[in-house]
Amino acid sequence: MRPGFGGPAVPVGVDVQVESLDAISEVDMDFTMTLYLRHYWKDERLSFRSNNNLSMTFDSRLVKKIWVPDLFFVHSKKSFTHDTTTDNVMLRLYPDGKVLYSLRVTVTSMCSMDLSRFPLDTQTCSLEIESYAYTDDDLMLYWKKGNRSLNTDERISLSQFLIQEFHTTTKLAFYSSTGWYNRLYINFTLRRHVFFFLLQTYFPATLMVMLSWVSFWIDRRAVPARVPLGITTVLTMSTIITGVNASMPRVSYIKAVDIYLWVSFVFVFLSVIEYAAVNYLSTLEERREKALRERLSCTCGIAHPGMMSASYSEVNANTTVNYGMPEVNGVKQQRMMVELAMENDQVTGHVGSNAYSNVWIDTHVIDKYSRVLFPGSYIFFNIIYWSIYS
C-alpha cells in the first residue's frame, strides 16, 4: 500500500543524471540514453531510531518488499535496468522515514524529428516520466530541484550531435481514460555537428561540380576527353545522392542536403548538355564551310587561304602538319604552315595573326561564356544556400 493510504496524494520528487547519450537515429526517429533515475518520498512506516542520524543503504532485495513509485517512460520503445555485476538499484532509508530510491536505466524513446534543415538542423527530443497506475489523487510527481533536476555534462557528444541545451518541465496533468496523471518532461536540444557532412557530402559534391567545368578548357574536338569527363561526374553525383538517401528516413518533404545535391547535379548535367550544344553547332559550322569550299576553285594546287581553319578542323591535330602532303626526296613537305602564311592582307601584305591562333586555340563561343557563367552561378547559389541554412 502507498504511504498515507486514504489520505492526500504522496509527493514524489524526481531528479535525473544523464550518464551518456548512446545513440540517435534519424531512420528510426528515436534516441537512446543511459541515466540515473532517483526518487524521493517519505514513508513513516520505514522510520527508525538513530542516535547519530545515520542512514541505512540496501540493495534491490528490499525494494521488492516495500512500496516504491511505479514510474515508466512514456513513448519508450525499450528500456532496461542494468544488472552487471548486480542489479544497479539502491535504496537508502533515513531515520525520519525519508526514502531515496535510485536505479541505473538505459531507455530508447521516440523523438519526432523535423529534417527539413538536415544536416544544418537542431532537434528537440523529450523524455517523459509518468506513474503507470496512480492518478494525481494518489501520487504527485514533481522535480526535486525544480528546473535544475537534470544533471548532465553539456559537452556530451555522440557522433553527429552535441547537447546544446536541456531543461526540465514541472508536473503537467495528462488525462487518459483511467484518470488524470502527472507527467514530467526532460527536453534535450541537440545541435548536429556539420563538419562530418562537410567532409562526406558537401565537399565531394562541390569538387564534382568544379571538375565538370574542366571540360570548358578542353579543345572542343577532343570528344574522347570531354564526353567521359561529363559522364563520370554525373555518375559520381548520382552515387553521392544515393548514399545520402540510403541513410535517411523516407520523408515527404525536401531536406536541405537534397537541395544542395540536386542543384549540384543539375550543374554537372548542364555541363554535359553544354558540350552537346558546342559539338552540334561546330558540326553545322564545318558543314557550311565545307559546302563553301567546294564551290571555290583551287589556285595552283593550294587550298584557298581562307579555308585553312575549316580544313584543320576536319583532321586530327597531331597529323595536320602532314595534311595531304606527299614525300619529295624523302622529306614530307609541311604545306600546312605555308598555307597559313599565305593568308595575308591583300592590301598591306602582312600575315594575318588569326590564322595561327585558330590552329592552336579552337574554342567555341559557348565555352567562353560557360567559363564565367557556370562558376558565377554556382558561387551565387552557395551564398544564398549558406545564408539561409547556416
Image (cartoon, rainbow, N blue to C red):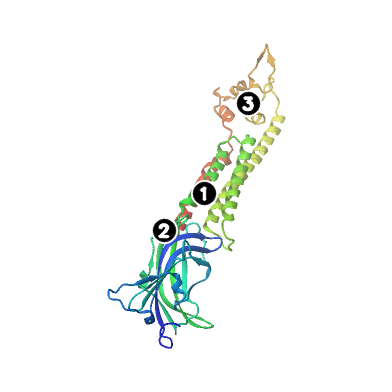
The image shows residue 354, relative to residue 142, as above or below, that is above
The quadrant in which the C terminus is found is bottom left
Label 3 Cα crowd, 10 Å radius (few <14 / some 14-19 / many 20+)? few
Total number of numbered discs in the rendering: 3
Left or right? Give the position of 235 relative to 41: right
Q: Examine the rendered structure and indicate whether residue 189 appears above or below residue 355.
A: below
What residue sits 40% from the left and 77% below the top?
Answer: 12
Q: Which residue is mark 3?
A: 318
In space, the residues marked 3 and 2 are separated at their CA atoms by 64 Å
Which residue is painted at 52% across and 71% down in the image? 75
Amino acid, disc 1:
Gln
* Picture coordinates of residue 212, whole percent (x, y): 56, 42
Q: Kindly identify which numbered label has been placed on residue 200.
A: 1
Which residue is disc 2 drawn over?
156
- For marks 1 and 2 on the same chain, the one whose residue lies earlier in the sequence: 2
Spatial separation of the CA atoms under disc 1 and disc 2 = 23 Å
Q: Nearer the viewer, residue 298 or 339?
A: 339
Q: Amino acid at mark 2?
A: Ile
